[in-house]
Image (cartoon, rainbow, N blue to C red):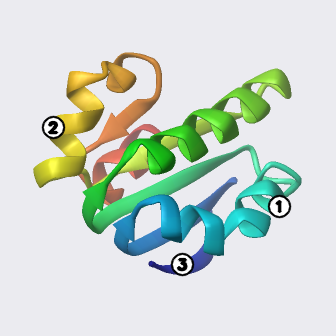
Amino acid sequence: MNVTELKCNDYQLIELRGDFDAAAVSMHKEKFEHYSDCDAKGIVFDMSNVSFLDSSGIGAMVFLFKRLRSENRDLKIIGLSGQPKRLIQLLRIDQTIATFDDLKSFLVIH
């Protein structure tokens, strides 16, 4: 998985590309821990280029969500489609973590 970081308004935008699985989480563990330390209002995961998501990827998102929430900050997800979207919906994560179709729809609200 490739990761690109951008600043977008008061949020840190994290573009993810590839599979968000155990190997990716292990490879990027330090980055995920660093995201909760940034001074942004919250984190936005752009998953429009993520084709596969497994329980390790879910775990990393939930871990980050809990850390951010304890600091009164947000985690948002944009661009879900295919298998990642189905898994997020099946686990009802989209009822806790706000999801948006794309960056434009996120920016309209934020």
Residue at the spot 21% in from the left edge and 24% down from the top edge: 90
Q: Nearer the viewer, residue 42 or 87?
A: 87
Residue 22 pos. (x, y %): 49, 59
**Which disc, if any, is residue 86?**
2
Residue 96 pos. (x, y %): 46, 18
The image shows residue 94, relative to residue 21, as above or below, that is above
Residue labelled with disc 1: 34
Q: CA distance from mark 2 to mark 1?
A: 28 Å
The image shows residue 53, relative to residue 62, as above or below, that is below
| Dot 1: element | helix
Residue labelled with disc 3: 3
Residue 99 pos. (x, y %): 35, 37
| Dot 2: element | helix
Q: Nearer the viewer, residue 63 or 102?
A: 63
- Residue 38 falls in which quadrant of the image? bottom right
Q: Nearer the viewer, residue 86 or 97?
A: 86
In the rendered structure, which disc, 2 or 1, sits on the residue that comes first in sequence? Answer: 1
